[in-house]
Amino acid sequence: MATTADISRRSAYHDDMTNRDIAAAFEQVADLLEFQNANPFRVRAYRNAARRVGDLTESAADIVADPERELTELEGIGKDLAEKVEELVQTGALHMLNELEQEVPRGVLALLKIPGMGPKKAAALHKELGITSLETLRTACEASQVAALKGFGQKTQEKILAGIDLAAHAEDRMVWAHADAIVQELLAHMRACHGIRQMEVAGSFRRGRETVGDLDLLIDADNANLVMDHLLTFNEIATVIGRGDTRLSLRLARGLQIDLRVVRTESFGAALQYFTGSKDHNVVLRGMAKDRGLKINEYGVFRVAAGSAEQGDAAEDDDEPQHKVESADYVAGRTEEEVYAALDLPCFPPEIREAREEFKWAAEGELPKLIELADLRGDLHIHTTASDGQASLREMAAAAQERGLQYIAITDHSPRVSMANGLSTQRLRAQWAEIEQLNRELENFSVLKGIECDILEKGGMDLPDDVLAEADWVIASVHYGQQQSRQQITERILGALENPHVSIIAHPTGRLINRREAYAVDLDEVFSAAARCGKMLELNAHPTRLDLNDVACGAAKRHGIPIVISSDAHSVGGLDVLRYGVLQARRGGLTAQDVANTQPWSKLKRLLRMK
């Protein structure tokens, strides 16, 4: 196990090359290779490597610096890719990427973000018209130059022109909670349409990703035009992108794109599985199908006759399916359960369809029963008007009881957070006395004496140990000094974990989705220390935090670290965000047994080895 001294020695030359940087470099290599129509297997290798490095909870740079470790020990990282990771770590650049960037103008890659624009058409635009950016493409469309190209035409030009603004904002993604509010409005609107047998929203939304780029709405109905016409009466529609016989794409004023597909009953399950994804999950699934002489796509699972060509997917720019499948070929597709059963697989919960561990779990017969919101018995991160909350101690306790919880911890801020009216020792002890009085009045409900205590910039806790020793529950948090080096922040957190009175580290990376990147911290060292010290880590359920993220939750589980899903509520309504934390925990593969606050307080107290 590395010490903080080891961290200091190792961070001397690689601290500025993060896993995120390495993954981004590999993704860019894959994009450039795909634009050049390179071997698809080569492109896929770089995308898989980007995902593998991006999912690591330990620093790839640390592995490079460790003489006893080899990058090739990691699944999906062969000798060639390992050498490129080492090159990035040691030089901060990748020669191959520099060469590719010289061959392909950087702005051309933005073309691939236009809906329906594949690499071949983007390459043709670059070669024939010298298109190097979205703006030069807009000019060419407005001059009707694109329509004149072979293989394009007026209709394609109009679709491209409509998609340019979408491509310019392709990186804009909405937090899941905000997308969910739109989904509920959308589904309520569509339920008023007659003739709909089934309806689901698929894609990254259904998988519970923390951000959503668009909504894939699947509907089982006979009259596609009636369904599409009804969708067009939904409020806030800003732009209709395109309409076919069974498909409609539009963009809302709030920025979210909706892609509607009306499918047949016999294909609804297959379409739901296909459009839920993820892409990596579906690649594995298609490979398994091929090994069994089957073809799986959005229309169903089909038996492929020996010696016959496999059915292809729809053409790159077409709106409708390009083939009809004979009914004799059809194996399954009405439900997702049918689709997976055709491959002798369980129906995977959507949240874990990321080609991480789900297929291994299925092969071993150990698919986890993922945690559900009803499993939670307590909320251990709550603020009141004593610091920066909007409701009193008694109001928060009553609201938690109404929601069926059995206990809460009141965890107002410590003095360092002066802007939030952090509690001095005197004020904190007065609050704890009030909590003791409240507990004498309550039945079948407990309020824990807690504190969210800052980890100081210089290290150490914001309150003396003798005060912390009086608490039932002590949260340690990093609010200040988030720009410090990876070594400094890691050492601060390790020091807090070693404090015998600290129960848990809150929002361990400090990130705010779409607003603030995580601070530099060695999570692998944090996990090791938390496991060694018998401490817990928080999954902060606030929809703009969701910290820890899904990958880190899975890593904490492998370390045997109990996770606590907390609301960090500053108001009565803030208690309702717990469901977002549960969704994130499910993506990390967590069960009720992996989450500490699914236990009654009596058992949780013993787990903490408290008096």
Image (cartoon, rainbow, N blue to C red):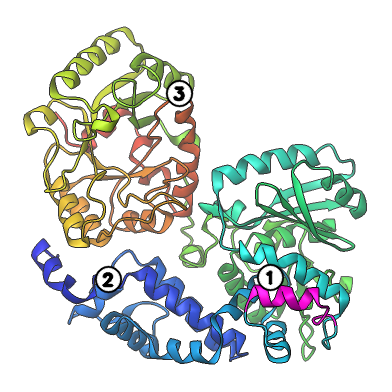
Q: Position of residue 190 (x, y in %)?
A: 80, 42
Badge 1: how crowded within 10 Å, few (<14), some, or many (20+)? many
As for residue 142 lying within the magenta part, the answer is: yes
As for residue 266 lying within the magenta part, the answer is: no
Badge 2: how crowded within 10 Å, few (<14), some, or many (20+)? some
- Amino acid tagged 2: Asp
Precedes in sequence: disc 3 or disc 1: 1
Question: From this viewpoint, which residue is outermost toward the top?
Answer: 441
The residue under label 3 is 572
Looking at the rendered structure, the secondary structure element under dot 1 is loop
Q: How far apart, in angstroms, are the residues tagged by discs 1 and 2?
A: 33 Å
Looking at the rendered structure, the secondary structure element under dot 2 is loop
**Residues drawn in magenta:** 133-147
The residue under label 2 is 16
- Amino acid tagged 1: Ile
Instruction: Quarter of the image for the C terminus: give it.
Output: top left
Q: How far apart, in angstroms, are the residues tagged by discs 3 and 1?
A: 43 Å
Looking at the rendered structure, the secondary structure element under dot 3 is loop
Pick the residue in front: 453 or 308: 453
